[in-house]
Image (cartoon, rainbow, N blue to C red):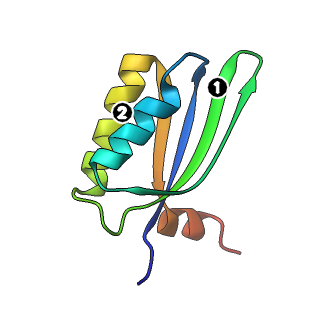
Amino acid sequence: MKKEILFITVIGKDRKGIVANISNCLYKMNINIEDITQKIVRNYFVMAMLVDIKDANCSIEKISEQLQKIGKEMELIIQVQHENIFKMMHRI
């Protein structure tokens, strides 16, 4: 089965619970985390995730909406981008 990948980036002041809140949200939407990298840079939390949404129980819009809600609550910038858009932007 072919995967349907979303790129999720998260930036904000470091605090407890960022990864837990985001991964729990994804779990509830039946989304699999394929790859994750995170780092603290001068007290700022920076994370990039690749997630597979092929079995998700909601739309991309709902996924983005739920992540934006977490972003607002935790004062984070969360961006969601479909792999197809990323590929089109970086085509030569």
For residue 31, what is the image quadrant? Answer: bottom left
Amino acid under disc 1: Phe
Q: Residue furthest right?
A: 42
Q: For the residues carrying marks 1 and 2, which lies nearer the camera in this image?
A: 1
- Residue at 61%, 45% in the rendered image: 48
Label 1 secondary element: strand
- Which image quadrant: the C terminus? bottom right
Residue 83 in the image, given as x and y percentages of width and height: 51, 65
Say above or below: 1 vs 87: below
Say above or below: 30 vs 78: below
Q: Residue furthest bottom?
A: 1
Say above or below: 12 vs 85: above
Residue 78 in the image, given as x and y percentages of width and height: 48, 35
* Residue marked by disc 1: 45
Residue 17 in the image, given as x and y percentages of width and height: 48, 23
Is 20 positioned to the left or the right of 12 in the image?
Answer: left
Label 2 secondary element: helix
Q: 78 or 3, which is in the foreground? A: 3
- Residue at 48%, 41% in the rendered image: 79
Q: 1 or 41, which is in the foreground? A: 1
* Residue marked by disc 2: 68
Say above or below: 30 vs 79: below
* N-terminal-most mark, 1 or 2: 1
Tell me if mark 1 has few (under 14), some (14-19) or many (20+) residues whose alpha carbon lies within 10 angstroms of its own: some
- Residue at 50%, 27% in the rendered image: 18
Tell me if mark 2 has few (under 14), some (14-19) or many (20+) residues whose alpha carbon lies within 10 angstroms of its own: some
